[in-house]
Each structure stands twice: as structure tokens, then as C-alpha cells.
Image (tube, coloured by chain):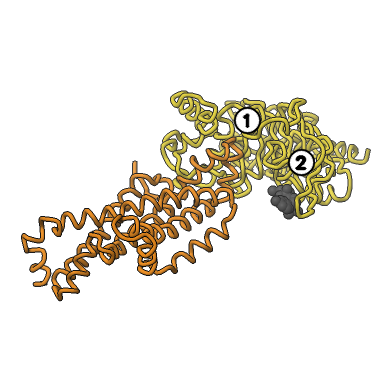
């Protein structure tokens, strides 16, 4: 506990370029940008293959294979190819990390909707897009959000690798702390990452509450 | 009117689900497709709203080949009810019912008002309107399914085993409700079921299909029961066919006796001498109170003090011969009490009268 007080209690750690607020912000920028890119890539693709059933096996197989990619290895590779200087090298492995859970869950969510329901929607005269947007997505939303939450937590935890290639973020504390045997700093960094992951979890719980229909989540409303 | 003109459906795997089906579904009537599982009922039904397209032949809706109409447009004009209701779980009941009006671009207020009207029509408590489907029982969901199909007032309604998944009591009430609605709305309804009793109860006409989607017989229920076209239909109709036929024979033809009634205010002494084995006691309001046997009466007092035996009634001019027979079997006298629409006794159908009527039915079956 003392170590934590040493780190968090030191006023010098709360300001300047190596201060906690800036490091947290950097970390959130890496994680947030990667997640955003992954969502933009994986959600439409997942919706499309879930709805049409086209290329499903191929996409899901490759998504699962991508999960096996070592993030750090990929990072090193990208840096070797692109050099350092921008944040692009760190975004690529993080996006690669975030895409599979979002893609697979979106696909599974859409495909898993009760065929009777899909059938009823067409039978009422909805067009393909209306079936997807008006029925399948709202019903599959809990699973889609679960995929995003899994991805978000992984990305927040893994964005520490940015420090390996000279970028900021909370990984700085961990790497620098370990390098200089400043253990309070390393542990403080790890604690901050964990706290951020928890905050992300809370944020998603909130989004889920707001966006998922009570008729789907089964939350009983007494009236 | 819906016309099947030599319709065939062969699935990609080679299964011939419907084979050269030709029949007409008249406007404003309930036509039931009935037959064993897998005989092509669902396939036939779904070709009407183009959920499936035929591989041969044509289906005409008021003379227009349905395959020339864009499927979503076609479907918005045809109500569709399926077995598990298929309600949208994320939408409130009222919005589920308003689905097609919304699609047709009605404004939200008008669509919701229409939905509320329909919920009432199908006998649902309006407080359910703001609930979600999972908060309703199976029977309630099925009613919502019917309301949703009716929302945009389509002239045609397709129903695929809509009541098969609910328990028998709820099923019976849903069937009654459908008949009541149909009496008001006069839709052209195609109703699919594997249950012959349901078919006979609901159908103005019943199409019996055999496996392979071939039409075995198309007839009104009374004719179907009286004159099954072949052994397949006879077997499918099952046991009790003779008794069930009586449901379609009006009770009007029964000879009634008016001399077997006695007012409740009569003195015992005035009836004891009668030769009849049983008399029906009539209350001051004209309704029946029960049967008495004159030879078992006490010595004095009025009939009001005499315990009467149970009785059964049928409404003359409305009930069938089957109801009359049922009424007779409910009383120890073996006679049925005939009443008018307001429950006043109009006479008694004796065993002899029932016997004559049954003999006439049996004669009809011979010819
Ligand atoms: N999509 C399909 N592909 C292949 N065969 C099918 C398909 N749908 C139905 N069938 C077959 O067609 C026949 C008729 O099916 P269906 O119309 O569902 O019958 P029913 O509704 O009378 O039970 C059955 O043998 C069934 O297995
Ligand atoms: Mg079927």
C-alpha cells in the first residue's frame, strides 16, 4: 500500500508531460481511436455476413486466427516497416486485436436471431434493410455490445505496448518504472490501467442500459 | 379471390412439396388447408404472399399473378399470422401491432390509435399495450399476432397453425374469437392446420391435402363429413365422423311436443293422474326448472316443493341436432327441452322425435 501512496501521493506525478492526467489521456486516445477504427471496420462487415450468410465461414475463421497474433510481435513488425514517429504503428496491432471479438459477436448475434422472427419481419412486408436495422440489430444488440466491450477492455489493457515504441500512455510508467527499479511507479501504472478497464466496463453497462430495449434485456418494468 | 392454377413447388433438394394444385379461395370466406404434417400446407400458404415462389403454375390474387408484384408491397396488403406469433421482442405491444401502418407511412398517432382499436377488437386488455411481448402469455401473444395482421385492414389474411402452440382451452377461445371477428370483418382467410376438428370448426370450406401437396377433397365441412371422397379423407376425418356430422344438421327439423310442460304453480294433485312418465316444470319466467316423474309425486302441495331432476336444453332455430341430442342425454327423461332465444320453453323433443331425426340423417348418408 505504501508504494501506492508513494506514487499517487507525489504531487509531481500529477502534472507535466509525464503526469497522470496526460498519460491517461494519451492512453485513452490510443485505445479509443483503435476501438473506433475496429468498430467501423468490423460492425458493418459482421452485420453484412450475418444478414446475408455470405462468406461467413471464411471471415469467422480468419477472425479467430487473428486472435492468435501476438500483439507485441505485430507492433515490432509494423515499426520495422513504417518506422516510429506517428501513432499509426501502435494503432494497427490494437485494431487487429479489437476486430475479431467485435466481428464474431456481431455476426453471431445477427445470425442467432430466431428464424421465426426474421420470417415474421419479412412476412409483414419489411424490406431487407428494414429487417436488419429494425429487427435484427435491436435484438442482437446485447451480443454486439458484448463484443465491443470485450474488445475495449483488451485494447485498454494492451495499449501499454505503445511505450515500447517510444510513445506515451500508461505503459510509460510500467516500462520506465521497471527499467529504473522504481516499483511504485510501475505498480501505479498497472493500477491505473486496471482502473481504466473498470471504467470502460462501467461505461458499457450504461450504454447497454440505455440502448437495449427492455423487451430484449428482459428488465421487468413494474407499472 | 385467390386462385391456385396448377401450382407446383419443387425445392432445390428435389422434394416436391406441392404438386399441380388447383383450387379457388372465395372472397370473404375462411378456407382451411388441412392435412398430415409435411403435406405442403405451409408451402402452399407461403406462395400466396411470396415468402416462397412456385416452380410451376400461377397464383392469382383477384386475377393478378402475385409473382408480378414486388414482395414487400404484396405482403403489406396481406395479413400474416404464424404459430409462435413472431412478435418483435424489442417493441411494445402497441408498436408491434402498428408495424404495417408504420411501414405504409401512417403518422405515428394515427397508427397507434388504430393499434389500440385492434387490441380491443381481439379482446385484449388495453393496459397490455405498453408492455413487451415477453410479458404476455402465449394466448395473449397470439391475439396480438392477429391484431398485427389486421392492422392495415388487409382484405386477405393468411394464418399458419396460429393456435397450435397454445393449450386446448385457450385454443378454443381463440377460435371463437376468430369466428366472431370474421363475422364482423368478412376477410378472405386461408387458415392452415393439421387438426381436422379445428378445420371443421372454422372452415367455410376445407381443402384436405395429402402428402405431396395434392388436393384430396375440397368441400364445406358438412359435405366433407357426410361424403368423404376416398379412404384417405375418411381416415383423416377419424372416428366419430357420424356424431360430428350432427353438428351440421339443424335442430329445426325436430318434432316438438307442447303437452309435456307444466307450470311450477300447479297443484301436485292436478298432474298425478297423467300417463306421461316425465313432465318438464316451467318457472314463472317461462324458463325450465327440471323434470318430474308424475308417479313419484307426494300427496299434496304445489310443484314448487317437489325436487326436480336435471335437464338439458337446446335453442330452437339456432342449435344443431347434436346439441339437442346432448341435451337429451343430460336428463334422466332422455328428452331434450327446446327453448327460444331468451330461454323460454317452447316444447320438448322426445326420444322418439330424436330417433326420427337421426333416421333421416342416416337415410341421407345412404343416398
Ligand atoms: N426449404 C425447404 N427445402 C426442402 N424441403 C422443404 C423445405 N420446406 C419444406 N420442405 C419439405 O416440403 C414438404 C412440405 O412442407 P410444408 O409445406 O412445411 O408442410 P406442412 O406445412 O404441411 O407440414 C415436406 O416434405 C418438407 O420437408
Ligand atoms: Mg406447416
Tell me the chain of label 1: B
Q: Which residue is mark 2?
A: B54
Q: Quadrant of the C terminus of chain A?
A: top left
Residue B214 visible to the viewer: yes
Q: Which of the two residues, A48 or B208, is positioned nearer the viewer here?
A: A48
Q: Quadrant of residue B187?
A: top right
**Residue A163 screen position, x and y as percent:** 25, 64
Q: Is residue B131 left or right of residue B296?
A: left
Q: Position of residue B201 (x, y in %)?
A: 70, 39
Q: Is residue A16 left or right of residue B323?
A: left
Q: What is the crowding at mark 2: few (fewer than 14 residues within 10 Å), some, or many (at least 20)? A: many
- In terms of secondary structure, where does tag 1 sit? helix
Q: Nearer the viewer, residue B253 or A27?
A: A27
Pointer 1 local density, CA inside 10 Å: few below 14, some 14–19, many at least 20: some
Marks 2/1 same chain: yes
- Residue receiving disc 1: B73
What residue is drawn where x is 62% and y is 28%?
B154
Q: Which chain is yellow?
A: B
| Mark found first going from the N terminus, 2 or 1 | 2
Q: Which residue is drawn at the image coordinates 30% and 60% (left, top)?
A: A84
Chain letter for orange, please.
A
Q: Is residue B285 above or below residue B230?
A: above
**Residue B223 in sight in this render:** no
Work out which quarter of the rendered image holds the N terminus of chain A and state it.
bottom left
How far across and how far down the image is residue B353, in percent?
A: 81, 35
Amino acid at each position: 500500500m505504501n508504494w501506492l501512496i508513494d506514487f499517487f501521493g507525489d504531487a509531481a506525478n500529477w502534472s507535466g508531460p509525464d503526469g497522470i492526467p496526460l498519460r491517461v489521456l494519451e492512453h485513452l486516445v490510443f485505445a479509443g481511436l483503435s476501438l473506433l477504427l475496429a468498430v467501423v471496420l468490423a460492425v458493418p462487415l459482421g452485420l453484412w455476413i450475418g444478414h446475408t450468410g455470405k462468406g461467413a465461414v471464411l471471415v469467422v475463421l480468419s477472425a479467430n486466427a487473428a486472435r492468435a497474433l501476438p500483439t507485441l510481435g505485430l507492433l515490432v513488425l509494423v515499426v520495422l516497416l513504417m518506422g516510429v514517429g506517428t501513432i499509426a504503428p501502435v494503432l494497427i496491432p490494437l485494431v487487429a486485436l479489437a476486430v475479431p471479438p467485435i466481428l464474431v459477436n456481431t455476426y453471431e448475434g445477427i445470425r442467432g436471431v430466431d428464424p421465426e422472427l426474421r420470417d415474421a419481419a419479412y412476412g409483414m412486408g419489411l424490406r431487407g434493410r428494414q429487417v436488419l436495422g429494425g429487427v435484427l440489430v435491436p435484438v442482437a444488440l446485447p451480443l454486439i455490445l458484448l463484443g465491443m466491450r470485450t474488445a475495449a477492455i483488451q485494447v485498454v489493457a494492451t495499449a501499454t505496448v505503445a511505450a515500447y515504441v517510444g510513445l506515451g500512455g500508461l505503459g510509460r510508467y510500467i516500462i520506465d518504472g521497471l527499467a529504473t527499479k522504481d516499483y511504485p511507479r510501475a505498480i501505479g501504472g498497472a493500477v491505473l490501467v486496471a482502473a481504466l478497464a473498470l471504467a470502460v466496463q462501467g461505461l458499457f453497462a450504461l450504454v447497454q442500459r440505455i440502448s437495449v430495449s427492455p423487451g430484449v434485456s428482459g428488465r421487468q418494468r413494474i407499472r | 379471390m385467390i386462385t391456385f392454377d396448377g401450382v407446383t413447388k419443387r425445392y432445390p433438394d428435389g422434394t416436391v412439396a406441392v404438386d399441380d394444385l388447383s383450387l379457388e379461395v372465395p372472397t370473404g370466406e375462411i378456407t382451411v388447408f388441412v392435412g398430415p404434417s409435411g403435406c405442403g400446407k405451409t408451402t402452399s400458404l407461403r406462395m400466396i404472399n411470396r415468402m416462397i415462389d412456385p416452380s410451376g403454375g400461377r397464383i392469382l390474387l383477384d386475377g393478378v399473378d402475385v409473382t408480378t408484384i414486388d414482395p414487400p408491397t404484396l405482403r403489406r396488403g396481406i395479413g400474416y399470422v404464424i404459430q409462435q406469433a413472431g412478435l418483435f421482442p424489442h417493441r411494445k405491444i402497441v408498436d408491434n401491432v402498428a408495424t404495417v401502418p408504420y411501414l405504409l407511412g401512417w403518422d405515428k398517432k394515427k397508427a397507434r390509435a388504430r393499434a389500440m382499436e385492434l387490441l380491443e377488437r381481439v379482446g385484449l386488455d388495453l393496459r397490455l399495450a405498453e408492455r413487451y411481448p415477453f410479458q404476455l402469455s402465449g394466448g395473449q401473444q397470439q391475439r396480438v399476432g392477429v391484431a398485427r395482421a389486421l392492422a392495415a385492414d388487409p382484405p386477405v389474411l393468411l394464418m399458419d397453425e396460429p393456435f397450435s402452440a397454445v393449450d386446448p382451452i385457450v385454443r378454443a377461445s381463440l377460435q371463437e374469437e376468430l369466428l366472431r371477428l370474421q363475422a364482423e370483418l368478412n376477410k378472405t382467410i386461408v387458415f392452415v392446420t393439421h387438426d381436422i376438428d379445428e378445420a371443421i370448426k372454422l372452415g367455410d370450406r376445407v381443402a384436405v391435402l395429402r402428402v405431396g401437396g395434392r388436393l384430396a377433397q375440397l368441400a364445406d365441412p358438412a359435405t366433407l363429413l357426410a361424403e368423404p371422397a376416398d379412404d384417405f379423407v375418411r381416415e383423416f376425418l377419424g372416428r366419430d365422423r357420424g356424431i360430428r356430422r350432427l353438428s351440421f344438421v339443424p335442430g329445426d327439423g325436430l318434432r316438438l311436443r307442447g303437452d309435456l310442460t307444466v307450470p311450477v304453480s300447479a297443484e301436485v294433485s292436478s298432474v298425478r293422474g297423467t300417463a306421461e312418465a316425465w313432465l318438464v316444470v316451467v318457472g314463472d319466467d317461462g324458463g325450465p326448472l327440471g323434470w318430474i316423474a308424475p308417479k313419484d309425486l307426494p300427496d299434496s302441495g304445489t310443484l314448487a316443493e317437489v325436487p326436480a331432476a336435471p335437464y338439458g336444453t337446446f335453442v330452437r332455430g339456432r342449435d344443431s341436432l347434436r346439441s339437442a341430442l346432448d341435451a337429451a342425454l343430460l336428463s334422466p327423461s332422455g328428452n331434450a327441452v327446446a327453448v327460444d332465444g331468451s330461454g323460454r320453453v317452447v316444447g320438448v323433443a322426445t326420444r322418439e322425435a330424436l330417433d326420427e331425426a337421426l333416421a333421416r340423417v342416416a337415410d341421407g348418408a345412404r343416398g
